[in-house]
């Protein structure tokens, strides 16, 4: 091909060559007719769709390694197709009105705009280095985790008396633009669903195609980079509140109060935190309430007063069961440490590890006993 390029075009046709590894099955065997371990591509497409199969192949093909093909990856591709389609239906189903943009939505739009720029810059670098499967995972996580799980939840209109409220037009238009950009980023990997949805998200002219759309995003500014870092902490605060719900068996629909202890370094994001964590209040307190469950985000302390929201009987049963397990575990560790033969012959690092298990268990048991006493006095 190099010779033909010089002969017919008078120049070298290309300078870079990308070699793929051997395609192997999930057991690591080379795919071949004699082994009968080669899947029927038409059958896979009928089962998972062409985009699902393409994604499955790329997920199995990290740069520099053999391709370990597993049909489960095609299923993952199909599930991602469904995720994209369902997100499109959700966005298209929202009603809009000429109303003011909520503060939480305005923050969400600024954050996701910066997130898109960050992911685009990462993908550009990955493409330059031919790390195709990593580029796919970058946009996959961007769509599944950041756009679907966080952004859409931040801007989703509230329900009043079982009826969805309209969305402000500013947020809706920004969301459509974000969706269009995501489709263009996904197009090299999933050309069919992205073309279909791209044609429907806006009115297009005859002959327009996502294949010829030009996508170019600027790198995040210093201010946007700080916003992205702050939002990661905001997500951890929301996750902390949700963890308290799970630990205390409090239903997601029950509104909670959140306390920032001594200072709130994330006050600018209160509207997002209140919405995503389903809070009735977010205040700054000198000390956490006696009935509060606390958690840390970096060096910042937060607490959720649970009061009468917990099922005291269920919490006592849970704590007693955990205490029984820990006491049995501690007994086993102490039995091992009391064995002179084990102590005399085991490596020093192993003995140190067992002593660490003993001290950790003692601390946890003491904390559980204190928790049980507090619960029984409620």
Image (tube, helix red, strand yellow):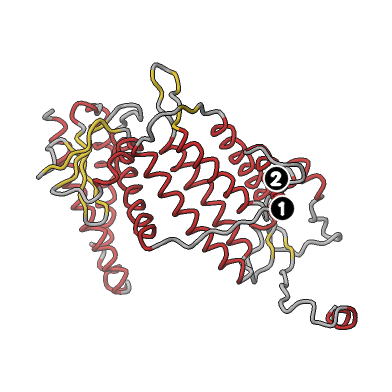
- Please report whichever mark, 2 or 1, sits nearer to the chain's N-terminal start: 2
Residue 37 pos. (x, y %): 79, 56
Q: Residue at x 11, y 30 (%)?
A: 377
Q: Is residue 262 among the parts visible in the rendering?
A: yes
User: 10 Å neighbourhood of mark 1: few (<14), some, or many (≥20)?
Assistant: few
Image quadrant of residue 57? bottom right
Q: Nearer the viewer, residue 210 or 29?
A: 210
Residue 214 falls left or right of residue 43: left
Q: Is residue 327 among the parts visible in the rendering?
A: no
Q: Nearer the viewer, residue 112 or 63?
A: 112
The residue wearing badge 2 is 195
Task: Tell me: residue 90, above or below residue 181.
Answer: above
Work out which residue is located at the far top of the displayed protein and give it. Answer: 161
Residue 357 circle label: none
Residue 376 falls left or right of residue 8: left
Residue 211 circle label: 1
Residue 187 pos. (x, y %): 66, 52
Q: Residue at x 51, y 39 (%)?
A: 173
Circle 2 — which element?
Answer: helix
Task: Tell me: residue 366, above or below residue 342.
Answer: above
Residue 249 falls left or right of residue 98: left
């Amino acid at each position: 091909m190099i010779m033909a390029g010089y002969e017919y075009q008078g120049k070298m046709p290309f300078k870079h060559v990308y070699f793929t590894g051997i395609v192997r099955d999930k057991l690591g065997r080379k795919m071949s007719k004699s082994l009968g371990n080669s899947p029927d591509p038409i059958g896979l497409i009928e089962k998972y769709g062409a985009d699902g199969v393409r994604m499955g192949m790329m997920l199995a093909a990290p740069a520099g390694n053999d391709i370990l093909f597993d049909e489960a990856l095609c299923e993952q591709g199909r599930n991602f197709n469904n995720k994209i389609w369902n997100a499109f239906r959700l966005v298209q189903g929202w009603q809009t009105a000429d109303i003011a943009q909520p503060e939480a939505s305005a923050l969400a739009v600024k954050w996701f705009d910066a997130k898109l720029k960050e992911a685009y810059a990462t993908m550009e670098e990955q493409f330059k280095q031919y790390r195709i499967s990593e580029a796919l995972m970058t946009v996959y996580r961007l769509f599944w985790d950041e756009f679907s799980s966080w952004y859409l939840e931040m801007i989703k209109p509230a329900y009043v008396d079982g009826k969805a409220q309209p969305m402000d037009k500013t947020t809706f238009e920004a969301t459509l633009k974000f969706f269009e950009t995501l489709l263009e980023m996904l197009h090299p990997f999933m050309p069919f669903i992205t073309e279909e949805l791209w044609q429907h998200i806006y009115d297009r002219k005859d002959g327009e195609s996502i294949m010829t759309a030009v996508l170019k995003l600027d790198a995040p500014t210093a201010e946007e980079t700080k916003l992205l870092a702050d939002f990661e902490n905001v997500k951890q605060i929301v996750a902390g509140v949700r963890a308290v719900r799970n630990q205390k068996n409090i239903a997601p629909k029950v509104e909670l109060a959140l306390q920032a202890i001594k200072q709130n370094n994330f006050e600018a994001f209160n509207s997002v935190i209140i919405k995503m964590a389903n809070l009735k209040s977010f205040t700054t307190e000198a000390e956490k309430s006696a009935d509060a469950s606390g958690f840390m985000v970096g060096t910042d302390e937060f607490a959720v007063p649970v009061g009468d929201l917990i099922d005291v009987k269920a919490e006592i049963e849970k704590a007693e069961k955990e205490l029984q397990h820990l006491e049995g575990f501690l007994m086993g560790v102490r039995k091992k440490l009391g064995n002179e033969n084990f102590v005399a012959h085991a490596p020093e690092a192993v003995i140190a590890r067992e002593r660490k298990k003993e001290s950790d268990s003692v601390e946890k048991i003491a904390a559980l006993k204190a928790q049980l006493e507090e619960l029984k006095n409620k």
